[in-house]
Image (spheres, rainbow, N blue to C red):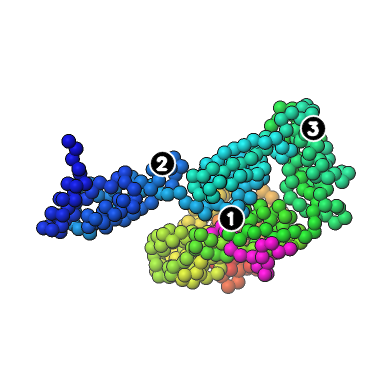
Amino acid sequence: MFLNTDLIGATLNGIGNLFFEKSWVPNVVGKEMEEAEASLKEYQLNPIMEEIPYRLSERDSAGIVVWQSVGDGSWVESGTDVTVSYNGLPREGLLDQQKMDSYVGKKIDEAAAELEDLQFVVERIEKESTEQPEQILSYDPPEDGYVQGNTIKLYYSCGIRNPEEQGDYEIPDFTEGDLDFLECKEELAKKYGVYLKKRKDVYREGIAEGIIVAQSREAGETITKGASGEARVIEVDVSGDKLTKMPDIVGKSYEEAVALLEQEDLGMEGFIAEKTKDESDQGKILSLGGGLKAGDTIERGTDPEVHYGLRSFEVQNLIGKTEAEAVELCGKSGVRVHPNKVRGGNHTVKAQRVGNRHIKEHELISEEETLTIDIGIPEAEYDSEYRETYMASLNAKLRAAGMHEVVYGGAGFVGLSIPWDGYVQLSAEQMAQKSFQWIYDHEKIEWPNQWANVPGAYTLVVGVELRFDNARGVSVKYNNQDFNVPGYEDSFQGGDQ
């Protein structure tokens, strides 16, 4: 004798609803999604249906419930949410003829993998052809439409199985003698098992259409008898009409757009980045400029205006925040940040900028940019900290160069002893310039800001002073005489240099 669990559950549920405002949870795993939903509602429960994307491997259980959040046989408050997961049904509209046409010319493995990821069945059919091996030649659409689970037939080239001559092949110069691309392509494939592939059409004044004008591999290179795959392929540029059609690139990725433009001998100088925090637009072509539309006639060799989305982040107002607070906020929003300590302040952010451009709240900066936050440090603390930091760094470099260390003499002055070899015959002005040149070459990149912010002067060699002045820039003094350092007068004016 078998117990009718549904009948028992319904009876218990009726009693629970009547006396306790409780509901019995039935087992809906293994049922059709519609049946499961109706059953839970019948038991005064609130079903939340969640679809698991359709998979070919689970096609026989499409629409069947595989999990429920509350176990069957449980007593819960009436109206309780019960989440139900079920295997999704096949979708349609993921492919169309235009998308399928784009697969022609692609490699069979690449296209098949993409179609299988979309949950279509792919049938591969090999055909002998003068096109390079593995290249898709054509396709048959599914008999019942582009619905997941249906079969798409892909016909691809296996090349020429038995070319007339099967020895080594020496690549000629295809650009001599006005060789026709289609004729050469057929002859090479059938005779030598070597495959010409058109890289792009280009306009060459005075040259007829269809003539080979450039090749990817040098004349004289040998394709050996046992070579296979890409080793037997030679890409060539072919002369075409001066005019072509603007390819449809809006919505495509940056890389896809570049490839399509290159095929038509169109350039990328007209690409314009537009900052966006919308992930669906990042890295995609947003629009064409200048009134240009896909399919419009355009001259080869030109650079169409193309707007693309550049991944960007919104900047918050960090003024007044501590360094730790500012860095944490930037990390949460994805902004790359560089703290920069400046003289004067109370350990909080005084400015936020990219280079010398100040950034306002809610302004976007791209992933390629770094937000610099200037942290104000009390003057006495700043001078002490950066003098010590600077001196330690400079001394390490001096020691590595076999030179004497700098000794801090107080009141903002330091003495630096540089070996006299090569300096003995120098004039005072030359000595000053030589000294500054060494410091400039070794320190400028690592210490662009701090030099200008450390007050006082540095004494170089004997009696030669290198002075830092935010207002005047850099000067060299010897025996109380000022000397200009050609090309470096304005090297340090504060800020980013």
Residue 244 falls in which quadrant of the image?
bottom right
Q: Identify the magenta region.
A: 282-297
First in sequence: mark 1 vs mark 3: 3
From what the image shows, is residue 255 above or below residue 195?
A: below
Q: Can residue 201 be seen in this view?
A: yes
Q: Can residue 430 be seen in this snapshot?
A: no
Mark nearest the camera among 1 and 3 is 3
Residue at x-position 44% and y-position 61%: 333
Question: What crowding class fits label 1: few (fewer than 14 Cα within 10 Å), some (14-19), or many (20 or more)?
Answer: some
Give the residue at mark 1: 253
Secondary structure of the residue carrying numbered label 3: helix
**Residue that sits furthest to the front in the current view:** 1
Residue 125 percent location from the top left of the image: 62, 37
| Point 64% across, 59% down: residue | 248
User: What number is the disc on residue 1?
Assistant: none
Picture quadrant of residue 330: bottom left
Label 1 to label 2: alpha-carbon separation: 35 Å
Residue marked by disc 3: 191
Q: Label 2 belongs to which residue?
A: 60
Q: How crowded is mark 3: few (under 14 residues within 10 Å), some or many (20 or more)?
A: some
Give the label, 1 or 2, closer to the camera: 2
The image position of residue 43, as x and y in percent, is 22, 54
For badge 3, the amino acid type reads: Lys
Between residues 442 and 321, which one lies in front from this camera angle? Answer: 321
Per the model, the C-alpha gap separating discs 1 and 3 is 39 Å
